[in-house]
Image (cartoon, rainbow, N blue to C red):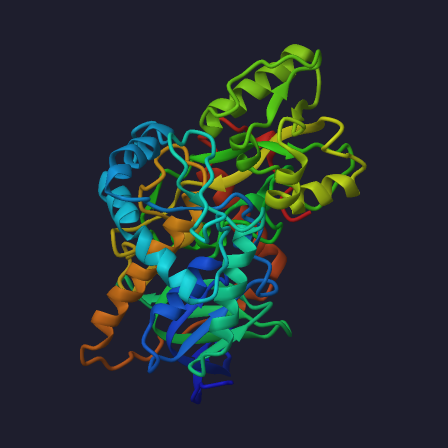
């Protein structure tokens, strides 16, 4: 499935020694195999050569972990309500143009997903079924059990793997972008065997995910440490809302150290689950926006001198639990909890990054021919706080807009520029580079209310 032309370039190293390194050429380089990167690849023309790299396995993206669902504008009568719900959750700091684009593009995205074979829950009449989550005023969320992200991303990945114009490289890390005169010409990567390479690309798309790997408690995969944010800062690429970090209010508490926190979906509370203090009394409106609910839970924990609060799923009929939330039920059972008979302990954990690399309505960054999509990007849709189940939709909508923008510009006469001389010496010590990048990202998000003691040790 390799489609690259091989060539060699002599590069001057920091020690004035010349060495030959392979240069891979591609039309499009996409860093990340979450839903945004995959959907973008599917929206690009079939005659473009596409290289997709991912830091871990192709399946190890947070898109696979999304439980609740994906929003869709139901009809014209839902527009004002959906628009207001998004802004209210975001504390009215949202870019209203981005919100409008997302809402008006949602039905087209859902049609695409259905065409790709994504299965959403249907009602007894065979129509799409909708659920409701916190801070939503209407039922407008499509879902597949409690593994909606997996259902969507698996189907997208399967489609991408069938494309003859795509090469997917797993365990391949984006180390840096290569630029001249604020124009992105390609990237430096480390491949699975540890070798360093440069990639020459007409357009580069950063779909690298979030920053959860920096936190002690996070629902994210641990390898997602905000590398793209550090790279952007290094090159003077504009960032936006870098301190806006969302904490998910309900993850299953465990005194044991584990790789990542298991999320108890917003949809559970949308379907009626309740939260109790240590005396098994309700203390909050469970459908508050996530940041407000998180604050209420942390306040109650401090008042009760506990490490968690209780969540009661027994308010949901057992048959609905089994149908809608089988993964949550099974995981809790594996941890010793029967959710049909007892409450479970839950605690807030880092979940989503609303800030990131600043992008326009076509996902362009401040560097020419460099795009950012998904959780890596900040187009202003979410404001200060993301409305539940807007993440998958926003990622797909603006991935498609990046592909559309590239398609238009890609049809213009264009001759790829040769890469400037690149020294690979700064990238040879992977641990030192990772430590440098983590320090950069932590400094960028230090303005958040979630203090530095929440971070994991840097490159432990």
Residue 403, how many percent across, how many down? Answer: 31, 66
**Residue furthest toward the left?**
412
The number of numbered discs placed on residues in the rendered structure image is 0
**Which of the pair 259/266 is nearer the observer?**
266
Q: Looking at the image, which residue is at 51% across and 32% down? A: 270
Residue 230 is left or right of residue 151, and the answer is left
Residue 369 is left or right of residue 188, and the answer is left
Residue 127 seen from this side: yes
Residue 250, how many percent across, how many down? Answer: 60, 31
Location of residue 179 (image quadrant): bottom left
**Which of the pair 90/343 is nearer the observer?**
343
**Is residue 206 positioned above or below 214 on the image?**
below
Q: Looking at the image, which residue is at 57% across and 34% down? A: 268
**Residue furthest toward the right?**
336
Location of residue 368 (image quadrant): bottom left
Q: Looking at the image, which residue is at 29% across and 45% down? A: 103
Residue 229, how many percent across, how many down? Answer: 44, 50
Q: Looking at the image, which residue is at 31% across and 46% down? A: 379
**Is residue 380 positioned above or below 190 on the image?**
above
Location of residue 278 (image quadrant): top right
Residue 206 seen from this side: no
**Which of the pair 257/434 is nearer the observer?**
257
Residue 105, how many percent across, how many down? Answer: 28, 53
**Is residue 347 positioned above or below 260 on the image?**
above
**Which of the pair 436/12 is nearer the observer?**
436
**Residue furthest toward the front?**
125
**Is residue 70 positioned above or below 370 on the image?**
above
């Amino acid at each position: 499935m390799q489609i690259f032309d091989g060539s060699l370039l002599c590069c001057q190293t920091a020690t004035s020694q010349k060495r030959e390194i392979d240069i891979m050429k591609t039309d499009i380089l996409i860093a990340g195999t979450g839903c945004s990167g995959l959907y973008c690849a599917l929206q690009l023309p079939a005659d473009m050569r596409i290289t997709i790299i991912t830091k871990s396995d192709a399946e190890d993206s947070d898109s696979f972990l999304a439980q609740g669902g994906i929003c869709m504008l139901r009809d014209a009568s839902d527009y004002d309500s959906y628009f207001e719900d998004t802004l209210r959750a975001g504390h009215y700091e949202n870019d209203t143009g981005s919100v409008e684009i997302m809402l008006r593009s949602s039905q087209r995205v859902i049609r695409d997903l259905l065409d790709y074979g994504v299965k959403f829950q249907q009602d007894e009449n065979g129509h799409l079924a909708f659920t409701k989550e916190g801070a939503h005023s209407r039922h407008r969320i499509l879902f597949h059990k409690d593994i909606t992200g997996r259902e969507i991303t698996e189907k997208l990945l399967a489609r991408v793997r069938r494309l003859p114009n795509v090469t997917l490289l797993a365990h391949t890390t984006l180390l840096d972008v290569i630029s001249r005169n604020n124009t992105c010409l390609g990237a430096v990567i480390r491949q699975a065997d540890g070798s360093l390479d440069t990639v020459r690309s007409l357009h580069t798309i950063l779909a690298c995910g979030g920053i959860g790997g920096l936190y002690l408690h996070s629902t994210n995969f641990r390898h997602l440490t905000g590398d793209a944010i550090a790279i952007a800062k290094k090159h003077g690429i504009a960032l936006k809302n870098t301190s806006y970090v969302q904490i998910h209010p309900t993850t299953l508490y465990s005194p044991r150290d584990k790789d990542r926190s298991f999320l108890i979906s917003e949809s559970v509370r949308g379907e009626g689950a309740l939260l109790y203090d240590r005396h098994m009394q309700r203390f909050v409106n469970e459908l508050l926006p996530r940041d407000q609910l998180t604050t209420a839970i942390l306040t109650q924990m401090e008042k009760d001198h506990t490490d968690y609060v209780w969540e009661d799923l027994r308010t949901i009929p057992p048959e609905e639990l089994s149908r809608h939330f089988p993964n949550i039920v099974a995981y809790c059972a594996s941890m010793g909890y029967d959710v049909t008979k007892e409450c479970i302990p839950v605690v807030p954990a880092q979940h989503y990054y609303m800030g990131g690399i600043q992008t326009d309505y076509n996902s362009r960054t401040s560097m020419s021919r460099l795009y950012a999509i998904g959780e890596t990007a900040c187009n202003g849709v979410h404001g200060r706080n993301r409305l539940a189940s807007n993440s998958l939709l926003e990622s797909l909508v603006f991935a498609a807009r990046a592909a559309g923008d590239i398609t238009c510009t890609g049809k213009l006469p264009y001759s790829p520029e040769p890469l400037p001389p690149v020294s690979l010496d700064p990238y040879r010590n992977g641990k030192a580079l990772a430590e440098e990048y983590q320090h950069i990202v932590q400094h960028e998000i230090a303005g958040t209310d979630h203090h530095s003691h929440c971070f994991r040790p840097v490159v432990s």
